[in-house]
Amino acid sequence: MSATPLPTDILLLILDAIDDEPESQPTLRACALTCRLLSRVAQARLFGDIYLGHTVDELSAFTRTIHESTHIAAMVNTLSIYMDYGAIDDFPMPPHVVAQLTGLQSARLGNSRDTYHNSAIVFSFFKLFGSLTTLTDVTFASISFPNLAEMIRLVWSFPFVQSFTLENCYIEAASPRSYTIPDPNAYPGHCRNLRSLSWLEMFIPLDLSLPIWGARVTTLTVVANRYEAQGVIVNISGTSPFPRLEYLELDLLDRPLGLTADVIRYLATDSLRRITVRHVIYHRYNFDEGRVLDLVATKFRQIKLDSLLSEGVLRRLERLLWNCSHVGVRQFVALGDHIRAMVPNATRRGVFVVEES
């Protein structure tokens, strides 16, 4: 008696359930060896999200697989490569192998060590990924740039990217402002598709006056580096560099509240609708609730947030969510009410919202 095969959609549901398990790799590899149908589906799950950061042999094995099996190359959707780039003297992956990753949508490229020194060959390797038209989401983590111009060249080498994240990177030059902006004509189409920019725990300030990021960014996220005393953002002046900005997220830790107000005022555009601010309202005296409330009141009076939210285009703002991080007060309701009392008009309109993280 012949067995009745399971319908394809049932097999796909079974593989989906397997893929959700923490130790799914051995089972998926076994499924890939059973039949042609299961082989393709299992391979898509095995190679859909690749992390390379353990050994050079692991990277070499992946490179050989992609070189020998072009159908597998197209299955790779997400690729993370973490290496000690300071120890290499050639491309970690040949250019033709990178070119075969025709289904790659997200890439995360970073150093695996605390020593971030990167040679010119490393930046040339990174730029190979810029030719992939499917690649829309890129993160560079723990990368050292010799100067700001080199960072700009790298960013401009990805004309198809929609979301850029720079995390925990820094510039080796003694002064971050000792640079010359590259000729934009040498990078046609740079940042033409960029919609989201995240500047996370960087060791250099975000210079908002520089024409780097194009004119179509709608989402901007800035997170301060807790170990760096340098300013998070510099050059708060002139015309807004993000004329289509819709959502702004600021995590400035315990930096002065005045900086937050300045950034909001500077980035305000006709399109800005939502802002999230994460801020350490205080980091001292949390043993004395009375002193905490007085300190918060003083800070909010200084920035005149209620007046700010009634100015010009900010009157169109739909929501300013003020998230108090690491508050440490037993009765947060009292603190929240105290903050809302400093911003009465925007609170009454439902624009200003306070919450505890």
Image: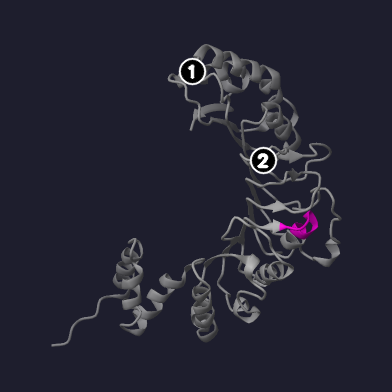
Who comes first in sequence, dot 2 or dot 1?
2
Q: Is residue 50 above or below residue 99?
A: above
Q: Is residue 172 above or below residue 235?
A: below
Residue at the image point whose x is 81% and y is 47% from the top: 175
Whether residue 25 is in magenta: the answer is: no
Name the side, left or right, on which 243 lies relative to 52.
Answer: right
Residue at the image point whose x is 81% and y is 51% from the top: 211
Say what secondary structure mark 2 lies in.
Answer: loop
Residue 326 image label: none
Residue at the image point whose x is 73% and y is 65% from the top: 157
Name the side, left or right, on which 268 lies relative to 354.
Answer: right
Instruction: Looking at the picture, tell me which residue is in the foreground, 347 or 213.
Output: 213
Q: Amino acid at mark 2?
A: Glu
Residue 228 image label: 2
Q: How is the image coloured?
A: one colour
Magenta stretch, residue numbers: 145-152
Residue 287 image label: 1
Most common secondary structure along the magenta stretch: helix
Instruction: Looking at the picture, tell me which residue is in the foreground, 27 or 350.
Output: 27
Q: Are marks 2 and 1 in contact (CB under 8 Å)?
A: no
For the N terminus, the quadrant is bottom left
Q: Position of residue 243 (x, y in %)?
A: 75, 44
